Amino acid sequence: MAIFKYQAYASKGQRNSGSIDALDSHAALTELASRGLKVYSLNEVNHKLEGHEVSSSVQPWYARSPVKTNQRIPKEEVLLCIQELSTLLNAGIPLADSVLNIATGHEDRPLGTVLKSSYTTLRSGSSLAIALKNSGINLPEYVYELIKAGEETGKLGASLLSASQQMEADAIFRRETRNALTYPVVLIASGLLATLVVFVFVVPKFANILTNPKADIPAFSRWVLQSGLWLVNNKTTAFIGFTSSVVGVWALLVQKKVRSRLWEAAASLPIIGLWITHVELTRWSSMFSVLLQHHVPLLDALRHSQNSLSGQTWRNRAELIARDVKSGQSLAAAMQNHNFLDAVGLNLVRVGEQSGKLAHTTASLALMHRTHAEQSMKQFLILLEPVTILLVSVLLGGIMISVMLAITSLTNVI
């Protein structure tokens, strides 16, 4: 057992000091926290030397200076953090204590460092929205807007709950899309691997046919045989070229502008374009509904909902709609002018404006487009799988046919 001297704040803000026996500093902090004390100084008394106590200072982690971290915080941890914070606030726990409790649970992780910074900012008198934004945590812009609305209306717990539900819906959508595309991607990768194996191990065995001057080899067969022979003789060059291509494609895809252009190009395709339309409208209407439910002004809700759109074309339309609404037009009229919604969607928005329940009608709009998006994705996958199998079969079959044509060309020699 060791003796620790501490200084802390009581639940009502009074300063408290004293000593405690504990196995280590962590046990001491745990015991003091169970007494309702917030420790800001903890000193271990080691021994006495000439009548003086010798002690080492042990600060609680949240009283130390912030440590900067460049580590990326997983989105799952951020979502869990918002959910925990909402639960604690709805249970009646004060905001600063809620942030501190969550930070304690992530003490040794980058999220704990970020929340520690937020806790320090909150104690200095800032709002939660400012504290989280200054901490560097990666949150969608609409979360900050919902937090601001919750702080202004006194319903911060409910606002955070809606924010976590929206974040969870976005995460589920990304996960379902990724899972849905896993099988076609694996199928394509397997086909390419099988093609590579054929080129490396099968095609070169028939390359000697190329040296036979009497063989009447078709042009396609000659090209296949020469490609396989070159691949075997230049494995290093081929590997470097393939690796460079993969790295180059990945470097392009991580750029937001490139992804946006690909998204725009895909939007013009027959089936996937319809899916993208429903996805964009699902995101926009869901975000718009949540913001309105928490009393965010209409123009601010339109501006922040615009950020949920991925395609630049859709963003431009949303910006024009916000401008028209600001000039005095109704939301339904502005949407109709810029072809933002179909007739059913426009009717829902028009009814919501007339009845004063725009948040509820746009929530129904989000649900409708989410259902359509799921149906479009299923239809796309139903067509993608056989098309992928067909393309891989044509590729492998074409190689084998070219080899067989080269072999049969030897009959002319006989």
Image (tube, rainbow, N blue to C red):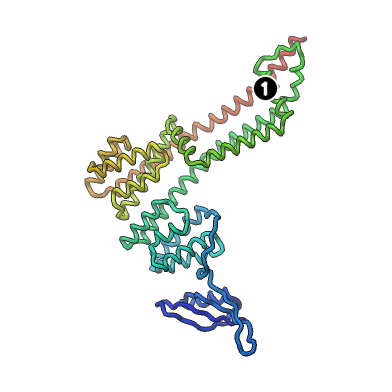
Residue in the foreground of this view, choosing between 68 and 119: 68
In the rendered image, which quarter contains the C terminus?
Answer: top right
Name the one closer to the observer, 357 or 383: 357
Q: Measured along the vertical axis of the image, is residue 208 above or below residue 370?
A: above
Compared with 306, 405 (above or below) is: above
User: Position of 392 compared to 360: left or right?
Assistant: right
Which residue shows up at 27% across the image and 41% down it? 324
Residue 43, percent from left and from top: 56, 79
Q: Residue furthest bottom?
A: 51
Compared with 70, 370 (above or below) is above
Q: Of the residues shown, which amino acid type is indicated by label 1?
A: Val
The residue sitting at 50% across, 79% down in the picture is 7
Q: Position of residue 159 (x, y in %)?
A: 36, 58
Q: Which residue is mark 1?
A: 224
Within 10 Å of disc 1 (Cα), the crowding (few <14, some 14-19, many 20+) is many
Name the spot of residue 239 as percent of width and height, x first.
Answer: 68, 35
Residue 412's image quarter?
A: top right
Indicate the quadrant containing the N terminus: top left, top right, bottom left or bottom right: bottom right
Marks counted in the figure total 1
Q: What x and y, as percent, mark residue 181?
A: 52, 39
In what element is the residue under mark 1?
A: helix
